[in-house]
Image (cartoon, rainbow, N blue to C red):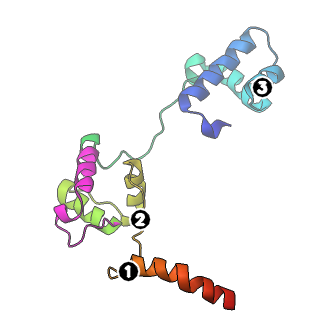
Amino acid sequence: MAASMTRAQMEARRLKGIELLRSGWSQADVSRKLGVTDAAVCRWNRVWKSEGKRALYAKPHSGRPPKLEPAQKLRLEELLERGALASGFETDDWTCPRVRQLIAREFHVDYHVDHLSRLLRDLGFTSQRPKMRSNRRDEKAIRTWRRREWPRIKKGA
């Protein structure tokens, strides 16, 4: 259940649990009401008693800061939407190695190519594969073949 909740929602749940405990509810009743384990309610109560209400507040996640600033991400999005040709590449296909080159050239920031898919997904881009079809493909001839020849071949099988 916790995986689908935001930090703010989990904080609100902890504070609600303490509020219920202070109003006389048992730990077991609080855990059932809030859909958490008895151990979680016990831990909240222990932390609240020893460190106070502030200890139950959501804490920001630590971690490495993003390599690109928000303004740079917006600029990257604009560059990607213009297309690879506009950025000096031979074809208009964006690949992770090309995006890496673009980021290095424009922002002087180095990304490992394996991690760019997450950045691109966060920007709203999806992975797409080109259709492998000949540029000499005759759609009309294919429809005719499917309508006339395929039923005859299938019937003979």
- Judging by the rendered image, the residue that carries numbered circle 3 is 31
Disc number for residue 114: 2
Q: Please tell me which residue lies in front, 31 or 75.
A: 75
Do the numbered discs 3 and 1 sit on residues whose CB atoms are within 8 Å? Answer: no
Q: Secondary structure at mark 2?
A: helix
Q: Secondary structure at mark 3?
A: helix
- Judging by the rendered image, the residue that carries numbered circle 1 is 138
Quadrant hosting residue 28: top right
Please give left or right for residue 117 compared with residue 71 in the image. right
In the displayed image of the protein, which residue is found farthest to the top?
23
**Circle 2 Cα neighbour tier, 10 Å, few/some/many (<14 / 14–19 / ≥20):** few
In the displayed image of the protein, which residue is found farthest to the front?
148
Query: N-terminal of the two: label 3 or label 1?
Result: 3
- Tag count in the figure? 3
Three-letter residue code for mark 1: Asp
Is the N terminus in the top left, top right, bottom left or bottom right quadrant? top right
Q: Which residues are magenta?
A: 72-95
Please give left or right for residue 143 compared with residue 10 in the image. left
Q: Residue at x 60, y 22 (%)?
A: 12
Query: N-terminal of the two: label 1 or label 2?
Result: 2
